[in-house]
Image: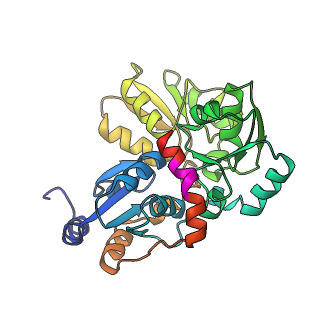
Amino acid sequence: MENYNDIQKRILALKEEKGALILAHYYVPLDVQDIADIVGDSFEMAKRAKEAKEKLIVICGVRFMGESAKLLSPDKKVLIPAVDAGCPMADMVTPEDVRRLKAVHPDAAVMCYVNSSAAVKAECDICCTSSSALRIAKALDAEEIIFVPDIHLAEYTASKLPEKKFIFHTGFCPTHHRVTEADILAAKKAHPDAKVAVHPECRAEVTKLADFIGSTSEIIRFARETDAQEVLIGTEMEITARLQRELPDKRFYSVTSAFVCPNMKKVTLQAVLNCLENEEYEITIDKDEADAARHSLDKMVAC
Ligand code: SF4
């Protein structure tokens, strides 16, 4: 415990006392990641929540991550530290949008990115993450696939599966969408020897300039394994900081200083401490909605 600051020590003591499991996403501040039992991307968090033996789970991330944990572990108490930490991309698609698309394309399978609400998941056949989208789309029997909400991940997946017809939604992640071709070109000019690793939530004009395209966990793996000594990171800035700390002999640069998810930054150490002390904010989901949503997440985890 000697390397932890006071607030981290209080969190760890409370975690022990209450028998809680703390799962953190890679985009929350590093000092929060440091007190977590597991740090991972959305898929790893969901999988770990499903396997959890603990009765109390703290999800250090945005609301849909808390909902996914609750759906997969319905008998557990699931808390999120920041009640207003939402995901603007998840808010861009509604259950009505999905119903409308299904009415126009009745033979299509409906895939939804895990970055969506429980109400939207309830309307879909299967969920996916950025690392599993291609594998899941390929495995689906249907030739037509409705993909919500992220248009960039959908377009990237569709580009790898020309034999399937994709029906897109218009959602996007503001943090990744705001990065442009000009940002990549400027970053490459500043660091000409660097390899470029980007997330498929980025625009096509950005991914086409990358040396590597992958989910957050895949980008981390690429950064560890590449022979390149410099890597430009095309996803949320906390990844750049985490990699630089882990691999001090290499150099990591964010493609732009705009790569920040403001909602993930609401999950501060103080918020985690309050969360454990007061056992708030608890995720609750209407039972019918949860029953309808669970199958699409279960299928994702099993796939
Ligand atoms: S980075 Fe984008 S997709 Fe992830 S939580 Fe933030 S807004 Fe949502």
Of all residues shown, which one is farthest toward the top?
227
- Decide if residue 73 is on the left or right side of residue 134: left
**Front-most of residues 72 and 57:** 72
Question: x, y percentage for residue 155?
Answer: 71, 36
Instruction: Indicate the colouring scheme.
Output: rainbow
In which quadrant of the rendered image does the N terminus lie?
bottom left
Give the camera-side residue of 12 and 166.
166
Foreground: 221 or 270? 221
Q: Nearer the viewer, residue 58 or 104?
A: 104
Q: Describe residue 209's horizontal placement relative to residue 242 as left or right.
A: right
Q: Position of residue 20 (x, y in %)?
A: 28, 66
Magenta span of residues: 294-298
| Above or below: residue 195 compared with residue 34 | above
Q: Is residue 178 left or right of residue 227?
A: right
Taking the spot 45% from the left edge, 59% from the top edge, the residue there is 69
For image coordinates 50% across by 50% down, the residue present is: 298
Magenta-span inclusion, residue 266: no
Relative to 219, say whether 9 is above or below.
below
Q: Quadrant of residue 222?
A: top left
Decide whether the magenta segment is chiefly helix, strand or loop.
helix
Identity of the residue drawn at 32% across and 73% down? 276
Q: Percent position (x, y) of residue 123? A: 68, 57
Where, by quadrant of the figure, is residue 293 drawn? bottom right
Task: Look at the image and say whether residue 295 sits in the magenta stretch.
Answer: yes
- Can you give x and y, in whole percent of width and height, for residue 287 in the image? 55, 71
